[in-house]
Amino acid sequence: MIQIPRGTYDVLPEDAFKWQKIEAAAREICARFNYKELRTPLFESTALFQRGVGDTTDIVQKEMYSFKDRGGRELTLRPEGTASIVRAYVENKLYGDPNQPQKLYYIGPMFRYERPQAGRNRQFTQFGCEALGSADPSIDAEVISLAMTFYQTLGLKKLKLVLNSLGDPESRKAHRDALIAHFKPSIGEFCDDCQQRLEKNPLRILDCKADHNHPLMATAPSIIDYLNDASRDYFNKVKAILDEMGIDYELDPTLVRGLDYYNHTTFEIMGASQGAITTLMGGGRYNGLVSELGGPETPGIGFALSIERLLLALEVEGISLNSDPALDGFVVAIGEAAEQKTPVLLNRLRLAGLTADKDYIGRKVKGQFKQADRDKAKFVVVIGDEELEQEKAVVKNMADGSQEAVAFKDLTDYLKEKI
């Protein structure tokens, strides 16, 4: 038997409506904040992620699904959304649109080759937002507020917002030099990846999973100590706006994020998952990414979150999304002549905007009523020989058991009025 690939999963019909509710909430909140959807391909040029995500990251070095097509082109299933959004922004010249900043969002599958575990799969779904074209600290706060609003709208309460600043290029260079000086004498004690990253991007060492318990990690220079006046002022403005909004946060100078393109504000939202605190989402500012991918100098900020981790957090907090949609009507046919009539009535109900169904596998009357119960039908429309002769249906209200004869021609209006 052919089985599903490792690290992937099926979303069965009884769970799909939970995803639909989450996606609907994301779209509704994005509309409130005036963010518009942008859809990009599932695969892109491998070079996009090497340049956009960073060739010193675990994603590029170890986790990408890359392949050559028949034309010999190097392609990669997208491992994250921001690089693709920025590529589309540059390629379609959205920087020339009079509506600035461009406030965009995406929902879709991403792919990373990593060890599957709860909330971490090889195919996973991300919801993300990107604001391109503004260096205003208030849009940093807006993006953070959008993410918090999304989680809170779905009912999560055990949330913690964590903030840091990576500063501007001048601040990052000063911090980079300090990190190299700190780690270089003992770099031989670190993993091969960290040894390669020392000169290329020492900030990545702080994000290493293999060496996170090394004593030098705890004493590494903090970026906060290397922020210049402009970077410190920017970060203070972001914090002040969040304070005014009433959004609580904690400062974490070790928060560096896993991608190379971040600068200035970085943030994560933590939540409960399987009894532990875990990262539900992360984001930050990336003022150099657009120019890195061939566009003009353009500031940007965004976030991405995992729908799978959100579902785990909802489960831990005991928040149910169970509201499997009920049918408005279920048509029960008694006899062969009635069977011929039900598809016509059923189609009429559906064209009028009602949700309706019937039996398709020859169940007896009792079995048809049981199926109506399983479908949570609000009304059952019963048609037999007598009803056909009178051109009326017996309509049973499943909530109170009452029933009424209704002419076929009036059935649609009757059900719409009752519902």
Image: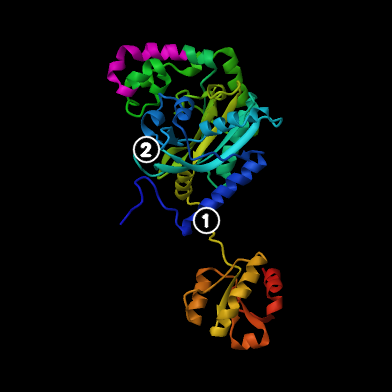
- Residue found at x 67% / y 72%: 415
User: Percent x, y for residue 348?
Assistant: 65, 71
- Residue found at x 50% / y 14%: 226
In the rendered structure, the answer to whether residue 235 lies left or right of residue 50 reads right
On whether residue 180 falls in the magenta region, the answer is yes
Asked whether the residues under the numbered discs 1 and 2 touch, taking CB atoms below 8 Å apart as contact, a structural biologist would say: no
Q: Which residue is mark 1?
A: 17
Q: Amino acid at mark 1?
A: Phe
Q: Quadrant of residue 231?
A: top right
Quadrant holding the N terminus: bottom left
Q: Nearer the viewer, residue 300 or 186?
A: 300
Whole-number angstrom distance, CA of label 1 to CA of label 2: 27 Å
Give the extent of the magenta segment. 175-193
Q: Earlier in the sequence, mark 1 or mark 2?
A: 1
Quadrant holding the C terminus: bottom right
- Residue found at x 43% / y 20%: 203
- For the question of whether residue 246 can be seen, the reply is no
- Residue found at x 51% / y 81%: 365
Q: Is residue 356 above or below residue 304?
A: below
User: What secondary structure is the stretch in magenta mostly built from?
Assistant: helix
Outermost residue toward the left in this view: 189
1 or 2: mark nearer the eye:
2
Q: Quadrant of residue 300?
A: top right
Q: Which residue is mark 2?
A: 113
User: Percent x, y for residue 312?
Assistant: 44, 47
